[in-house]
Amino acid sequence: MPDNPTSMVNVHTSIPTTLAQTVESYGKCSKTLFAKAGVDVNKDLGPDKRLDGAVSDELWRLATQATGDDAIGLIYTQYIQLSSFHGLGFSWAASDSLYDAFARFARFFPVISTAGEIDIRDKDDEVHTALVLPVPYGIANDSAVDSSLALLLHLCRLVRGKQFRPKLVEYQRPKPKSVKTFRSFFNCPINFDAPENKIVLSANDMHELLPGANSELTFANDRVLLNYLRKQGPQNIISEISMLVVNALPSGAPSQQEIADQLHISRKTLQRRLKNEGTTLSRIIDDIRVQHSARYLVQDWRSISEICYLLGFTEPSNFTRWFKKINGVSPQAYRDIKLNKK
């Protein structure tokens, strides 16, 4: 049974343990199912373990077969807790907005699985979030893929209420026998045999302030997740630095030494690794400011002064000059255009 945490494709053990609960809810024996997949529950599962991706896929296949329910990927989300996936749900719940939560989910998706990535795209007044898999359709189990988009909606409903619904959901899979369950669960138009697996939400819903927003909690939980990923193997230096920069900006743009200290490496090592990636700390800071300024400005509950603070500018006038140089318009004009106020 492979348990190498640096395996090319592996998943967090919250997936199989939650799947076991789901199978039991159908009156089926999960231990029998796990034994068929060659999984030793006592040896192969645990907080510091990762399960081989192929074995996880086989568990999903066996679970779908044993229950006879091709909507099991949706039912599975009923047993997901905020503490699942090393507490990723806690960071989600403390995020400023759903957009921030989705971005955090994308950044830390390797905690859940290294089998793919989350791609977030802004399109007019919508935000499209897709699960991108590096394999042709048919390789990954349908129920496993079903669970990914269902998980995103489940997390949305935990912070926005049970009636929250997306604008559209699309799956690459063919129409399932239990299509009514799918339509009832998502409560929105849903297309099958689609080009990609994605969930579409309105930009307004994505940028609205969440009731549990707490930057201190997100910072603390993000550190836990980052430390977890570090234990699993080498991480992309740009991703690590980007997260540290975002957290540091309200106190001003961090120096190379400050970032190096947080990464527990020397400043020269940091410079060398950045050079190997073909970038610099100042470029990373600029890129983050560009991305986050655009996101913050469509959140109309944020004042320009607050955005200035979040991006590490000492004066609103400095932020305005910088933003106008990058975008050709002032922050307020940009906000008015995006929110159709002019």
Image: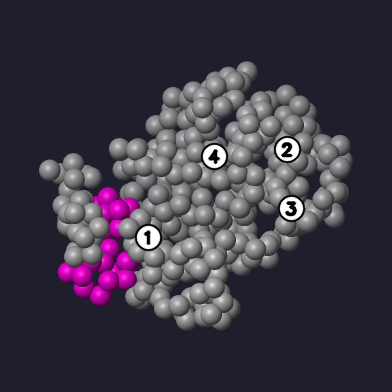
Secondary structure under the numbered disc 4 in the rendered image: strand
Q: Which residue is mark 3?
A: 7
Tag 1: amino acid: Asp
For image coordinates 19% across by 59% down, the residue present is 324
Residue contact at pointers 2 and 4, CB within 8 angstroms: no
Q: Which residue is mark 2?
A: 57
User: Callout 1: few (<14), some (14-19), or many (20+) C-alpha neighbours within 10 Å?
Assistant: few
Residue contact at pointers 3 and 2, CB within 8 angstroms: no
Mark 1 vs mark 2: in front: 1
**Residue 127 appears at what percent x and percent y?**
38, 40
CA gap, disc 1 and disc 3: 31 Å
Count of numbered circles in the view:
4
Q: Does the magenta segment cover residue 87?
A: no
Mark 1 vs mark 4: in front: 1
User: Callout 3: few (<14), some (14-19), or many (20+) C-alpha neighbours within 10 Å?
Assistant: some
Magenta-tinted stretch: 293-319
For image coordinates 20% across by 51% down, the residue present is 334
Q: Is residue 336 visible?
A: yes
Measured along the vertical axis of the image, is residue 255 above or below residue 214?
below
Q: Which residue is mark 1?
A: 287
For image coordinates 45% across by 64% down, the residue present is 279
Chain-order first, disc 3 or disc 4? 3
Mark 1 vs mark 3: in front: 1
Secondary structure under the numbered disc 1 in the rendered image: helix
Left/right of residue 75 with respect to residue 57 in the rendered view: left
Tag 4: amino acid: Leu
